[in-house]
Amino acid sequence: MSKSGKLQSIRGIHDGLPDEVRRWRHVEAAARKVFARHVFDEVRLPVLESTELFVRSIGEATDIVSKEMYCFVDQGEDHICLRPEGTAGAVRAYLQAGLTRAGAQRWFYIGPMFRRERPQKGRLRQFQQIGVEWFGVAGPVEDVEMLVMAHDFLVEIGLEGLSIEINSLGCSVCRPPYRDKLVAFLEARADSLCDTCRERIAKNPMRVLDCKVESCQAQLTDAPEMVAHLCGDCAAHFGGVKSGLEALKVPYRINPRIVRGLDYYNRTAFEIVTDRLGAQGTVLAGGRYDGLVEELGGPATPAVGFAAGLERLALLLPEVPAAKPDVAVVALGDAVLDRSLELAGQLRRDGIRVVHCGGGGAKRQFKVADREAARFTLVIGEDEMTAGQVTLKRMDTGEQWTVPLAEAAAMVGHGEAA
Ligand SMILES: [Zn+2]
Ligand SMILES: [Zn+2]
């Protein structure tokens, strides 16, 4: 509760009111349409998971787990969290259902995630993510297909100014020697790096590469890049991704600054950015996580996925206008009220969008009809009822006709309501 005593939503947690939800639905519809063409199935996974799942998958040392998760101990003394992301739960479900021998699984999900981030930065503490996971495929063909699906999805939404950025994070063979080289490079410049970067040199040197501080980036122009230190297998894999994108004439750029914080991420990492958001341009991020299924107790299983924030995508859309009613029904007199309700029902069964103006005084009802901005007003009085007819008025031209209902329906009729 706020100081004034009025009930308020929790800070950083927003309501989805109709204007916003229409945009969300536009994004969701695009996702469902494009993912269906690639034969991905929807899963609906729990919002609550055991705390241990995220400690084991995302890692205790990360900001997400150490600072940002909403965790609690429930009445049965179980340690539970609101999920901060979707992949860990998807892997848990995949293993729990025993699907590791069932062939490749293609999943997507849409749902809320929770992170206690600082709301002053405009971050939402409850946000929606659209995520995709493809288990049991080693690529590089599937990496290309994943990128194409992600890009098609954003194009389907209507986003412009998109570009694909890819990188390779190597593997357990080529990453450790590369990491040593990077650490040596960073240590020589430690004095010029920010506090966060200095801390990361030992713990997570690759994360230094994507530091957003300008003075750090200035130090990193000559930093060794993973893509130049790939082992033979990783180089061949990355080559396969690049040639696949080239064959499809999908433009991309190699961005050696795309990194992930955790060891189970390997090889292909990608982001799709737009120039319509200013500096914070990433709208979708993904890549390969061949080590995670094993990390969570399953057999070694390669996997690739991506995720995008729904609210962030919706922000880039123009307003999606509310659909107006086709017909507002006005009943002149109590004697025709039942008949007017029946007519409204018949029209709706024909797929026409109908509001009933509530009966009562004619003046009030016409006011309601005006406010609803229906394309037509359908008026029924006692004379019309006796004659088995209705009066249909087209609101933009003022034309009107007294005709049987079926005829009126046909005149309104443009088939299904949107
Ligand atoms: Zn490698
Ligand atoms: Zn830094």
Image (tube, rainbow, N blue to C red):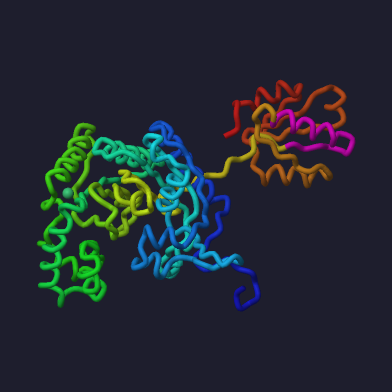
Residue 234 in which image quadrant:
top left
Measuring 27% from the left and 40% from the top, which residue is drawn there? 138
Measuring 73% from the left and 33% from the top, which residue is drawn there? 378
Q: Is 238 positioned to the left or the right of 26 in the image?
A: left
Q: Which sits in the foreground, 384 or 44?
A: 44
Measuring 27% from the left and 48% from the top, which residue is drawn there? 270
Residue 382 in which image quadrant:
top right
Measuring 57% from the left and 50% from the top, which residue is drawn there? 18
Looking at the image, is 394 positioned above or below residue 92?
A: above
Looking at the image, is 86 positioned above or below residue 3?
A: above
The reply to whether residue 82 is in sight is yes
Q: Is 390 positioned to the left or the right of 286 in the image?
A: right
Figure disc tally:
0
Where, quadrant-wise, is the N terminus in this rendering? bottom right
Highlighted range, magenta: 329-348
Where, quadrant-wise, is the C terminus in this rendering? top right
Whether residue 330 is in magenta: the answer is: yes
Residue 236 in which image quadrant:
top left
Q: Is 56 positioned to the left or the right of 44 in the image?
A: left
Looking at the image, is 140 positioned above or below residue 189?
A: above
Percent position of residue 304, x then y: 32, 44
Q: Name the main secondary structure of what is drawn in magenta.
A: helix
Whether residue 123 is in magenta: the answer is: no
Q: Is 187 positioned to the left or the right of 269 in the image?
A: left
Percent position of residue 3, x then y: 61, 78
Q: Which sits in the foreground, 33 or 63?
A: 63
Q: Which sits in the foreground, 3 or 372?
A: 3
Percent position of residue 325, x then y: 64, 38
Percent position of residue 260, x then y: 28, 57
The reply to whether residue 314 is in sight is no
